[in-house]
């Protein structure tokens, strides 16, 4: 998988947002997903990333549309939501934005999709559904 060279301004923006956002580690989320009351999992990556593979049980609301569409999917702002992206940067920004919209139980998956794959955990693709 490709790694990205992030601009200093973007990294500063993410780090500033990270101070206001709760993150969940991959082992912790993996344990929660098998429980009865697991959080909703939202993939905030772009369409082409989603089509190549995603975490099991995820729904897709990309970073470009999530603020517009989240209330249709989850009108209850107390819904527990875990957002993830490729590496945990975009999802932090999304979580900060959702918190500003009043969502109280949003967390970002630390390490994102790449961390999940690197941990050897299963993914879904269009072929596996």
Image (cartoon, rainbow, N blue to C red):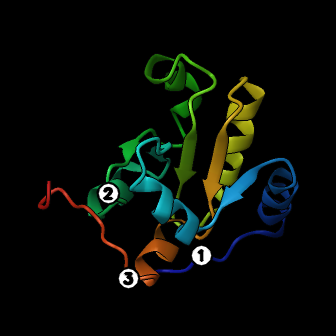
Residue 121: image x %, image y %?
37, 75
Dot 1 and dot 3 residues touching (CB under 8 Å): no
Q: Quadrant of residue 127?
A: bottom left
Q: Nearer the viewer, mark 2 or mark 1?
A: 2
Q: Residue at x 78, y 57 (%)?
A: 14
Left-right relation of 37 to 106:
left
Left-right relation of 119 to 55:
right
- Which is nearer the eye, 95 or 1? 95
Where's the N terminus, which quadrant?
bottom left
Residue 10: image x %, image y %?
77, 60
Q: Is residue 100 above or below residue 31?
A: above
CA gap, disc 1 and disc 3: 21 Å
Q: Is residue 7 above or below residue 2?
A: above
Could one spot residue 63 in this view of the protein?
yes
Q: Give neighbour class at mark 2: few <14, some 14-19, many 20+ (Cα, 10 Å).
A: some
SS at circle 3: loop
Could one spot residue 1 in this view of the protein?
no
Along the polypeptide, which appears first: circle 2 or circle 1?
Answer: 1
- Which is nearer the eye, 69 or 107? 107
Along the polypeptide, which appears first: circle 2 or circle 3?
Answer: 2
Q: Give neighbour class at mark 3: few <14, some 14-19, many 20+ (Cα, 10 Å).
A: few
Q: Which residue is mark 3?
A: 120
Q: Give neighbour class at mark 1: few <14, some 14-19, many 20+ (Cα, 10 Å).
A: few
Left-right relation of 67 to 119:
right
SS at circle 2: loop
Along the polypeptide, which appears first: circle 1 or circle 3?
Answer: 1
Residue 104: image x %, image y %?
71, 31
Q: Residue at x 50, y 47 (%)?
A: 44
Q: Is residue 38 above or below residue 53?
A: above
Q: Residue at x 43, y 54 (%)?
A: 33
Residue 4 tag number: 1
Q: Which residue is mark 2?
A: 56
């Amino acid at each position: 998988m490709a790694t990205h060279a992030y601009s200093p301004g973007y990294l500063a923006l993410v780090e500033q947002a990270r101070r206001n956002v709760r993150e969940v580690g991959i082992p912790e989320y993996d344990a929660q997903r098998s429980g009865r009351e697991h959080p909703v999992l939202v993939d905030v990556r772009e369409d082409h990333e989603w089509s190549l593979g995603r975490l099991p049980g995820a729904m897709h609301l990309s970073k470009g549309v999530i603020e517009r569409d989240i209330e249709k999917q989850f009108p209850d702002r107390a819904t527990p939501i875990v957002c993830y992206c490729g590496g945990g940067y975009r999802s932090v920004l999304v979580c900060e934005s959702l918190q500003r919209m009043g969502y109280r139980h949003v967390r970002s998956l630390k390490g994102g999709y790449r961390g999940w794959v690197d941990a050897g955990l299963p993914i879904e693709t269009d072929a596996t559904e």
